[in-house]
Each structure stands twice: as structure tokens, then as C-alpha cells.
Image (tube, grey):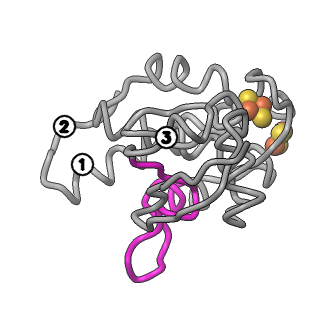
């Protein structure tokens, strides 16, 4: 039986009727129309459905929507600047030629955001480890790592935190 749940997604509060077995991914895409979060494997192996739940990168396809009540959910639609311009990570991906297809890019960017939010100066190994479950196998990963490093440097510079990612 469906139950009414209240979800905070990108700082907007939504009340929806959801089955206890319904995943966060289903609710985001099918009920809220937030299709930036991609559905691919549906079994927790590709990372394309990654969103941030209370500051942590999680797989929306393995997270039940009912478990997200009272928590803060951020999707790719919620990270741009208030004026609508791209988030520094998105900008860095564009500027450094790291944008990949529409399926994997949102998951990679959300994973990178959770990493930089937690570790403002990630080393290459940190980035590789964070993205291990998300990076696509279609192409090389060098540009992605470079883009994340440059985004971290930019964010640190803007926030006055001067140390440089290695
Ligand atoms: S859709 Fe592949 S891990 Fe969620
Ligand atoms: S899955 Fe997106 S480029 Fe490979």
C-alpha cells in the first residue's frame, strides 16, 4: 500500500504517495520528473544514478524513497548556482573536455561533488577511489580526474582556502 512521504529534494519539499518498495530513483524520475538522475543497471553496479543524500554520495537505485524522509537529497538539477550558471564542477568538466554522455556524466559529477564537499583537496588517488564505481568504461579517465582536480582548486580559491590539489 502506498504511503504519503515528504522528501526534501534540492531544497524543495515534495509530498508524494510511494510504495515502501519504491526506490529513490523511481520517485525522482517518475514522480518528480527529475530525469537528470539516470536509470541504467538498476542493480548498484554502474553508479549512474548517484545522488547526494545528507552529504554522502549514494546510489538512488538501491535506496528506498521511504528511507529518505527527513534527509536532504541533492540531484544534478540542484547543484547549479542560484543565478542558473553551472556549478564549478560542471564548468570544469566543460572546460577540461571531461563531459561524457548524458548517462554517466550526472553520476560522475555528483560523486565528484560529494568528494570535494568532504575533502576540498583530493589527491589523484582520492579521486580515482571515489569515482571507481561511477566512471564509464567507454573512454579514458584522465580528463575526468583532471577536471575534478581543477574544480577543487577553483572552489578552494573562491572560498579562500588556498591549498592546491595534487
Ligand atoms: S542505475 Fe546503476 S548503480 Fe544505480
Ligand atoms: S557511459 Fe557515458 S560515455 Fe560511457
Q: Is residue 65 left or right of residue 86?
A: right
As for residue 78 lying within the magenta part, the answer is yes
x, y percentage for residue 166?
Answer: 35, 27
Q: Is residue 49 left or right of residue 120?
A: right
Look at the picture and state if 87 lies above or below 152.
below
**Label 2 vs 1, first from the N-terminus:** 1
Residue 47 circle label:
none
Give the magenta range. 72-92
- Residue 35 percent location from the top left of the image: 74, 60
The reply to whether the magenta stretch includes residue 147 is no
Is the CB–ligand 2 distance for label 2 below 8 Å? Answer: no
Q: SS class of the residue under badge 1?
A: helix
- For disc 2, the neighbor class at 10 Å (few under 14, some 14 to 19, many from 20) is few
Position of residue 159 in the picture relative to residue 77 (left or right): left
Residue named by callout 2: 163
User: Which residue is tagged 1?
Assistant: 156
Decide: is 92 above or below 122. below
Q: Mark 2–mark 1 contact, CB under 8 Å?
A: yes
Q: CA distance from mark 2 to mark 3?
A: 35 Å
Q: Residue shown at 76%/21% (left/top)?
A: 45
Residue situated furthest bottom in the rendering: 83
Specify whether residue 83 is in view.
yes
Amino acid at each position: 500500500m502506498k504511503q504519503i512521504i515528504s522528501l526534501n529534494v534540492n531544497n524543495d519539499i515534495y509530498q508524494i504517495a510511494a510504495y515502501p518498495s519504491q526506490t529513490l530513483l523511481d520517485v525522482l524520475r517518475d514522480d518528480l520528473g527529475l530525469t537528470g538522475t539516470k536509470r541504467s543497471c538498476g542493480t548498484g553496479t554502474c553508479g549512474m544514478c548517484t545522488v547526494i543524500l545528507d552529504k554522502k554520495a549514494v546510489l538512488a537505485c538501491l535506496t528506498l524513497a521511504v528511507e529518505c524522509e527527513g534527509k536532504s537529497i541533492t540531484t544534478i538539477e540542484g547543484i547549479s548556482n542560484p543565478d542558473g550558471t553551472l556549478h564549478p564542477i560542471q564548468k570544469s568538466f566543460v572546460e577540461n573536455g571531461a563531459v561524457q554522455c548524458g548517462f554517466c556524466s550526472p553520476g560522475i559529477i555528483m560523486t565528484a561533488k560529494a568528494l570535494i564537499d568532504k575533502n576540498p583537496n583530493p589527491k589523484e588517488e582520492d579521486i580515482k577511489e571515489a569515482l571507481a564505481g561511477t566512471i564509464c568504461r567507454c573512454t579514458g579517465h584522465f580528463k575526468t580526474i583532471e577536471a575534478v582536480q581543477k574544480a577543487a582548486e577553483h572552489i578552494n580559491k573562491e572560498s579562500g582556502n588556498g591549498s592546491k590539489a595534487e
